[in-house]
Amino acid sequence: MFNNFHYYYKYLPNAGGWGNFLSKPGIVENTWVKMREITLTYDLPEKLVRKLKIFQGLTALVTGRDLFYFYSSVPDRINPEGILGAGDAQGFEWASLPGVRSITFGITAKF
């Protein structure tokens, strides 16, 4: 029949109510290395800042948070940090929010 099916069905025996036990397919190693945060800054040249006659210094910056995983042992692109779960499902990827990537731009000015 079909060999391509949603990864959820591999772990379906673990989905259920009280009285269901963990099955081996639902127990996975959760090791990961992540680019949590990186900031790049650039000080504008002093000659350019002096021409503006308003600032003593200007710095531009960009910050990225939760950008990507270098390594994750969790199969099928499951979010390794999704095990926080919701309600009584601690330790399961169950009704957890997806990861959020953010990029921030900023300027620091010295007057």
Image (tube, rainbow, N blue to C red):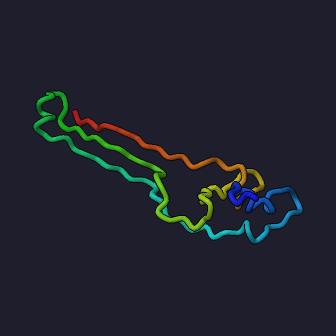
**Residue in the foreground of this view, choosing between 103 and 108:** 103
Query: Is 41 positioned to the left or the right of 88 in the image?
Result: left
Give the number of marks: 0
From the top left corner, tell me how far across and down residue 108 is, in percent.
29, 38
Quadrant in which the N terminus appears? bottom right
Query: Is 71 positioned to the left or the right of 7 in the image?
Result: left
**Residue in the foreground of this view, choosing between 5 and 38:** 5
**Residue in the foreground of this view, choosing between 3 and 75:** 3
Query: Is 20 positioned to the left or the right of 26 in the image?
Result: right
Residue depicted at x 48% and y 52%: 66
- Extreme residue toward the right, this view: 19
| 70, above or below 100, in the image | below
From the top left corner, tell me how far across and down residue 12 is, in percent.
78, 59
Quadrant in which the C terminus appears? top left
- Name the quadrant containing residue 93: bottom right
- Name the quadrant containing residue 51: top left
Query: Is 89 positioned to the left or the right of 45 in the image?
Result: right
**Residue in the foreground of this view, choosing between 60 and 13:** 13
| 20, above or below 94, in the image | below
| 57, above or below 73, in the image | above
Residue depicted at x 14% and y 28%: 53
- Extreme residue toward the front, this view: 1
Residue depicted at x 70% and y 54%: 6
Residue depicted at x 63% and y 70%: 29
- Extreme residue toward the top, this view: 53
From the top left corner, tell me how far across and down residue 71 is, in percent.
50, 65
